[in-house]
Structures are given as structure tokens and as C-alpha cells.
Amino acid sequence: MAVHQFEPGLAGREFEYWLRRYRRTWRGTVVVSIANPLLFLLAIGAGLGRLIPDSAALGGVSYLAFFAPGMLAAASMQNGVVESAFPVSWARRRGGSYQVAGAGPLEPADILIGHALFMTFKIALGAAAFLVVMIAMGAARSPLVLLDLPAAVLTGLAFATPTAAWVITVQRQGTAGTLFKWVVMPLYLFSGTFFPIAALPVPVRVLAYVSPLWHGADLCRTLSLGTAQWGMSAVHVAYLLALTFLGVYIGLRTYRTQLHS
């Protein structure tokens, strides 16, 4: 079977496995994927945000309206990494679910695509919960905020698929956790989540512009505020899609190498 081929029905079996597992373990994941981001929104957006006056630097809107869509994108990034790094690290180990699935009719491509579908589901679930609260708090300024859901999911996938493609190659358990120290946390701080990147020094600002999180945050924010320029929005979508498909492309090869080794 060619590297890129997979059976939709078999990929669906992999998705079903992760969905059944989630039904048994969902309580333990709610805090990380849903509760923590919502607490950030309440504490910083609605709490600290009341002390920050509207300003030209924020586009003349309240800090809550500025912060909430950026936090939506950042939470989706975090969920994308959480849902790919740790489950893939666990599943690839000896006796893990990848090894069991690979011993049956599933090809590595089926395993990757099926798991990626479940990652999409989890990212969408967290983003939808966040979006509901965000709208209820009055953080949205435009009906286009509804498009923040697919924008946030795409942001999460731009991190999830490359992470999965890399983690499947990592032998040491726990190495995936370094992503939070060296990738997730710096991006939280320097990709326009908490403040406009125009406030950053020029060299750091240039790096922020190539960050997938900045593209996701700017896309979500401009849609929420009703200031989206469709040309720039198309650039954001294309950039995030390219990273998502690049992750799948590389993953098809790394999964085959690792699961057939």
C-alpha cells in the first residue's frame, strides 16, 4: 500500500477507539481543555481587563474584546499540542494502542488520520465551549465571531498535526512535555494574545509574524471585532492550512517508519 493511501472506514475505527476512550476519561481532561482557558478569560479578560481603558493600541475596544479572541486561539493551540503530544507519546510505546492497531488491518495512515480526526473533535469541543462563554460575556463585536470556531480549530490543527508527526519519532517518554516550555508558553506571551505585537521590539515582532499562533489570533480577533480584511484573512487561513497539511504529509511518513519498524 502506498504511503498516502488509507481506508476511510479503517480510519473511522481509529477515531471510534479514541472517542470510546474519551467517554470513559473525559472528566480528567475537562480542566486542561476547557476549564483553564475559561478561567483565564474570566480572570484576565473580565477581571484585569476592567482596569485597562480602551485605547488606540487596542483598536479602541475594551481589553476583554481584544483579549478574548486571542485567548480562544491560544487555548486552541494548547489543546492541539495536548491532544497530540501526550496521547501520541503514550500510544506509540510498546503495547500502546498504536502497536495494537497496527497488528490488525489498520495501516499507519489509517491510524494517523483517525487520530487526527479525534484531535479535531477535541479542539472543536474546547473552542465551542470557550466561544459560547466569550459571546455571553459580550466580548464579541460582530456576527462574524461565529467564524471564530473554524478559525480556532484550524489554529489548533496547525500545531496538532506537526506535533504528532514529530512525537511519533521520539523514543523517550516525557520529551513531548518540553514543547510547553519552549514552544507553547513563549507563543502565549509573544504572539499577540495578551497585547498587540506592535509593542514588541522589531526583531521579536518579525518572529511573531511567522508564528502560527499570531495568524490564528489575528484571524479570530478581526472576525470577532468585525474588522477582518478578507485578503489578510485568506493569508491567515492559507498559512494555517499549509502547516496542517504539512504535518499530515510528514506524519504519513514518520508514522509508517515508526509503526513498521
Image (cartoon, rainbow, N blue to C red):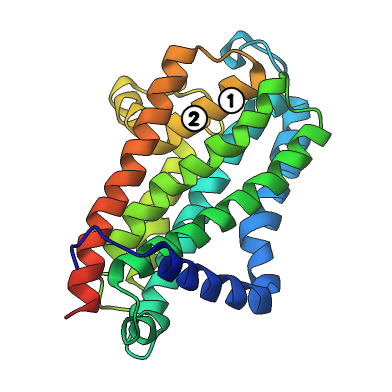
Up-down: is 42 above or below 6?
above
| Residue drawn at 31 percent across, 37 percent down | 242
User: Residue 165 appears in which quarter of the rendering?
Assistant: bottom left
Q: Nearer the viewer, mark 2 or mark 1?
A: 1
Quarter of the picture containing the C terminus is bottom left
Is 261 left, or right, of 156 in this rendering?
Answer: left
Question: Percent x, y for residue 210?
Answer: 32, 31
Question: Percent x, y for residue 102?
Answer: 32, 81
Residue bearing the label numbered 1: 221
Up-down: is 206 above or below 46?
above
Q: Are marks 2 and 1 in contact (CB under 8 Å)?
A: yes
Task: Determine whether the residue tagged by mark 2 lies in a helix, strand or loop.
Answer: loop
Q: CA distance from mark 2 to mark 1?
A: 10 Å
Of the numbered discs 2 and 1, the one sitting upstream in the chain is: 2
Is 83 left, or right, of 158 in this rendering?
Answer: right
Is 1 left, or right, of 185 in this rendering?
Answer: left
Which residue is nearer to you in this view: 238 or 103? 103
Kindly identify the amino acid type of the residue bearing the numbered disc 1: Arg
Is 62 left, or right, of 20 in this rendering?
Answer: right
Residue bearing the label numbered 2: 192
| Residue drawn at 42 percent across, 21 percent down | 234
Which residue is nearer to you in this view: 97 or 141? 97
Quarter of the picture containing the N terminus is bottom left
Task: Determine whether the residue tagged by mark 1 lies in a helix, strand or loop.
Answer: helix
